[in-house]
Image (tube, helix red, strand yellow):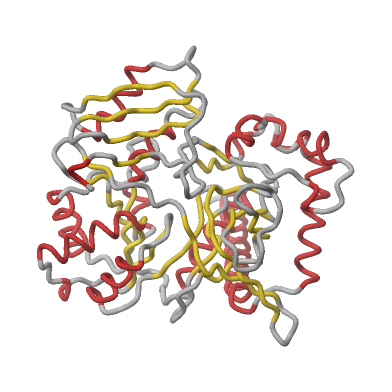
């Protein structure tokens, strides 16, 4: 090997080592701060740094918040607001450099397609926070995990090499019928998967199937069940605890920000990651703070996305938060309750249940054309698709076909164009709703 090549490889190895140490420190600090809480000085410093940076670096915040001194003077933003002002919010140093950023895409359970760009540091934080939340509940590096998602080829799937390297098995949940669930159970057993990482809706279907079919899980290697996305229903939590002999882990977060709160061992509430986020609970009908113990909208300020500042982001979820200060003066936050993301369970033409995330992932591919969408099941094979969309750009047949792929070829799908998807009593615009009398 030539001296130049040896020097180059040595340099890369040193860089990898430095990066590895930084990531390990990040993970360690995050774990400590979630458990131990933060100081008032840290919170004030992070907020001040973020707000000043946004006013200096983002055209949107320069124009609208130049004189703002406090967080309450910044506007509350939802997905539609971010989409409408996307290029203005993107910070100056990332304009024209979008290829160097990471894309965090989601339709969200509110049915509004949405993509956030983030810098490398924020992406590292998302990954390390995920591991931190897992390790706080007993995860060990090297454990084989199965991730339950609607895996779309060319969209979010990963290579065989990356799957092997990360000890990750992709488990598709686009269909949750008995045949699909039988295959999933077979994969868990044959692949000797130790950790199930899944959306709550899929875990509900899996637990019900195991019960109904009297599946013997004693031969499985599962040591942890990690629930993400929508809140895990208490009945499913109890079922999984009884089936596996240990409590599943509840978490709360989203694709745009990462993990926001985690249930610590032995606790039923969610410990909020105040190290990475500032959380507000605002009233359901205004941007005023909710009273202590009052359900309200969960609004997130992300301290660390320097490419696309997310300040006072209305997640669309509702919850109850409790804040306390311990005897050492450190601040702690918990969610006593988290609501939302509990869309009606939908069925395809064969009567097989479908994950809500089927409908959420369909919308990802329609970003910029479909602003909001909601699929309503009226009969076993008749559906209605409500679309708030750009009618000059939309290919209606293609949109209907994307839904029919999951609903079935026999599905009768009526399209209704609307200016807005009605808000439900929960305060959310859900991507699907079942009004079929046969499934009530």
**Residue in the foreground of this view, choosing between 131 and 42:** 42
**Residue in the foreground of this view, choosing between 72 and 106:** 72
| x and y percentages locating residue 192 in the rendered image | 22, 66
| x and y percentages locating residue 252 in the rendered image | 49, 60
Q: Quadrant of residue 200?
A: bottom left
Residue 132 appears in the rendering: no
Q: Residue at x 59, y 58 (%)?
A: 125
Residue at the far right in the pictured view: 67
Q: Quadrant of residue 214?
A: bottom left
Above/below status of 229 relative to 221: above
In this picture, residue 233 sits left or right of residue 115: left
Residue at the far left in the pictured view: 213
In this picture, residue 127 sits left or right of residue 189: right
Total marks drawn?
0
**Residue in the foreground of this view, choosing between 4 and 121:** 121
| x and y percentages locating residue 327 in the rendered image | 72, 87
Q: Residue at x 57, y 52 (%)?
A: 257
Residue 191 appears in the rendering: yes
Q: Residue at x 71, y 36 (%)?
A: 89
Above/below status of 132 relative to 340: below
Above/below status of 321 relative to 75: below
Residue at the far bottom in the pictured view: 327
| x and y percentages locating residue 395 in the rendered image | 39, 16
Q: Residue at x 38, y 65 (%)?
A: 226
């Amino acid at each position: 090997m030539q001296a130049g090549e040896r020097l180059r490889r040595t340099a890369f190895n040193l860089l990898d080592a430095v990066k590895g140490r930084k990531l390990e420190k990040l993970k360690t600090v995050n774990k400590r701060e979630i458990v131990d809480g933060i100081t008032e000085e840290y919170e004030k410093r992070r907020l001040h740094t973020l707000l000043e940076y946004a006013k200096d670096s983002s055209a949107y915040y320069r124009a609208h918040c130049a004189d703002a001194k406090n967080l309450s003077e910044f506007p509350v933003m939802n997905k539609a607001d971010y989409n409408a002002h996307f290029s203005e919010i993107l910070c100056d140093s990332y304009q024209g450099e979008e290829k160097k950023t990471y894309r965090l895409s989601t339709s969200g359970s509110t049915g509004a397609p949405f993509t956030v760009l983030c810098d490398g540091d924020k992406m590292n934080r998302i990954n390390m926070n995920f591991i931190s939340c897992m390790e706080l509940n007993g995860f060990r590096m090297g454990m084989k995990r199965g991730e339950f998602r609607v895996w779309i080829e060319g969209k979010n799937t990963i290579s065989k090499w990356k799957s092997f390297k990360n000890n990750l098995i992709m488990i598709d949940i686009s269909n949750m019928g008995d045949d699909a669930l039988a295959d999933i159970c077979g994969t868990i057993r044959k692949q000797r998967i130790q950790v199930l990482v899944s959306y709550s809706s899929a875990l509900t279907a899996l637990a019900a199937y195991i019960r109904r079919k009297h599946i013997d899980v004693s031969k499985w290697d599962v040591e942890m069940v990690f629930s993400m996305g929508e809140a895990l229903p208490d009945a499913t939590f109890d079922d999984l605890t009884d089936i596996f002999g240990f409590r599943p882990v509840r978490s709360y977060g989203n694709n745009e920000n990462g993990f926001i709160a985690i249930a610590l061992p032995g606790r039923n509430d969610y410990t909020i990651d105040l190290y990475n986020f500032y959380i507000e609970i605002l009233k359901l009908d205004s941007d005023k703070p909710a009273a202590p113990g009052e359900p309200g909208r969960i609004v997130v300020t992300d301290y660390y996305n320097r490419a696309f500042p997310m300040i006072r982001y209305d997640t669309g979820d509702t919850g109850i938060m409790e804040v306390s200060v311990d005897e050492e003066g450190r601040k702690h936050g918990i969610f006593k309750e988290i609501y939302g993301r509990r869309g009606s369970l939908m069925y395809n033409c064969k009567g097989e249940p479908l994950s809500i995330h089927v409908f959420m992932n369909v919308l990802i591919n329609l970003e910029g054309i479909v602003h909001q969408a909601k699929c309503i099941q009226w009969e076993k094979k008749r559906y209605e698709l409500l679309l708030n969309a750009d009618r000059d750009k939309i290919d209606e047949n293609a949109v209907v076909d994307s839904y029919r792929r999951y609903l079935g070829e026999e599905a009768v799908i009526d399209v209704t164009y609307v200016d807005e998807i009605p808000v439900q009593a929960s305060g959310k615009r859900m991507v699907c709703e079942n009004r079929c009398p046969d499934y009530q």
